Image (spheres, rainbow, N blue to C red):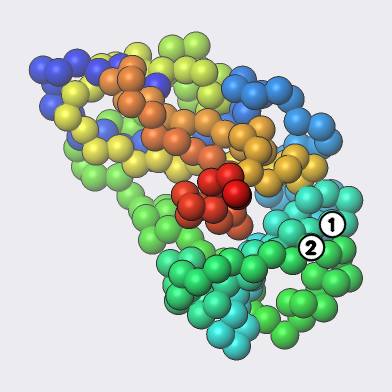
């Protein structure tokens, strides 16, 4: 959360911020294991390495781990969302590890990354978190180099530009679409929330949420 004061005009950037999104503060604790370190998740859970995005001959797949070797796959025509998808209906497939490996064996795995990742902050930026100290935050706590949720800045800011880097937890045994799979946010002016939610592979068309007749 960011303290605000209408008379201040400050350009703000959070450099190398990785927020540990503790969904347990908002929703009931999920069943099953939770990982916040990608390297540890990859070493301890083979499902993590199979989860991801793939493209193949005019189609694209978003593979979502469900835990214990089970997966849900969203299938897109034309390419991935934001990169070629023709916005037609999203297909859904479920399968086990061997079935998903067979589905993606001839596909190209895609790893997308923001072009601003790792960029140097502007010279006049206020660095609120760099992964080493939570001194700029009221009751700020570090966990494995991440800033835990439930804190706010000690300084007040008015007109600002904010750069945030965050990390969602890997909670495969929690149902996709559940807020407990990874849900948090950034509050500005103690009022307006920028939602951070694990929506990977989900159909975000509002019409798809409406109750069927």
Residue hosting label 2: 94
Q: Position of residue 55 (x, y in %)?
A: 60, 78
Mark 2 nearby-residue class (10 Å; few <14, some 14–19, many ≥20):
some
Front position in the image: 167 or 176: 176
Residue at the spot 81% in from the left edge and 32% down from the top edge: 31
Q: In the image as oriented, which residue stretches furthest toward the bottom?
A: 57
**x and y percent of residue 108 in the render?**
64, 80
Q: Mark 1 — residue?
A: 70
> Viewer-proximal residue, 33 or 144?
33
- What residue lies at 43% left-to-right and 12% top-to-bottom? 138
Query: Is residue 117 shown left or right of residue 3?
Result: right
Q: Are marks 1 and 2 in contact (CB under 8 Å)?
A: yes
Q: Position of residue 84 (x, y in %)?
A: 45, 76
Of tags 1 and 2, the one toward the viewer is 2
Q: In screen coordinates, is 39 left or right of 184?
A: right
Which quadrant of the figure has residue 29? top right
Asked if residue 180 is positioned above or below residue 5 in the image, the reply reads: below
Which badge, 1 or 2, is on the more N-terminal residue?
Answer: 1
Q: Residue at x 39, y 22 (%)?
A: 1
* Numbered circle sitting on residue 19: none
């Amino acid at each position: 959360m960011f303290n605000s004061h209408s008379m201040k005009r400050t350009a703000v950037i959070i450099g190398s911020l990785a927020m540990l999104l503790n969904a347990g503060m908002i929703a009931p604790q999920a069943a099953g294991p939770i990982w916040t370190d990608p390297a540890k998740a990859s070493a301890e859970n083979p499902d993590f390495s199979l989860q991801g995005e793939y493209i193949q001959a005019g189609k694209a797949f978003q593979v979502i781990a469900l835990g214990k070797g089970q997966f849900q796959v969203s299938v897109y025509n034309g390419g991935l969302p934001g990169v070629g998808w023709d916005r037609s209906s999203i297909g859904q497939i479920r399968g086990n590890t061997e079935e998903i490996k067979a589905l993606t064996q001839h596909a190209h795995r895609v790893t997308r990354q923001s072009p601003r990742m790792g960029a140097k902050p502007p010279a006049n930026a206020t660095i609120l978190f760099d992964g080493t100290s939570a001194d700029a935050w009221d009751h700020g706590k570090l966990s494995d180099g991440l800033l835990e949720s439930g804190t706010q800045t000690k300084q007040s800011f008015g007109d600002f530009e904010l750069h945030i880097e965050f990390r969602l937890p890997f909670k495969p045994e929690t149902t996709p679409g559940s807020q407990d799979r990874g849900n948090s946010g950034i509050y500005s002016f103690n009022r307006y929330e920028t939602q951070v939610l694990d929506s990977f592979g989900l159909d975000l068309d509002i019409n798809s949420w409406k109750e069927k007749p």
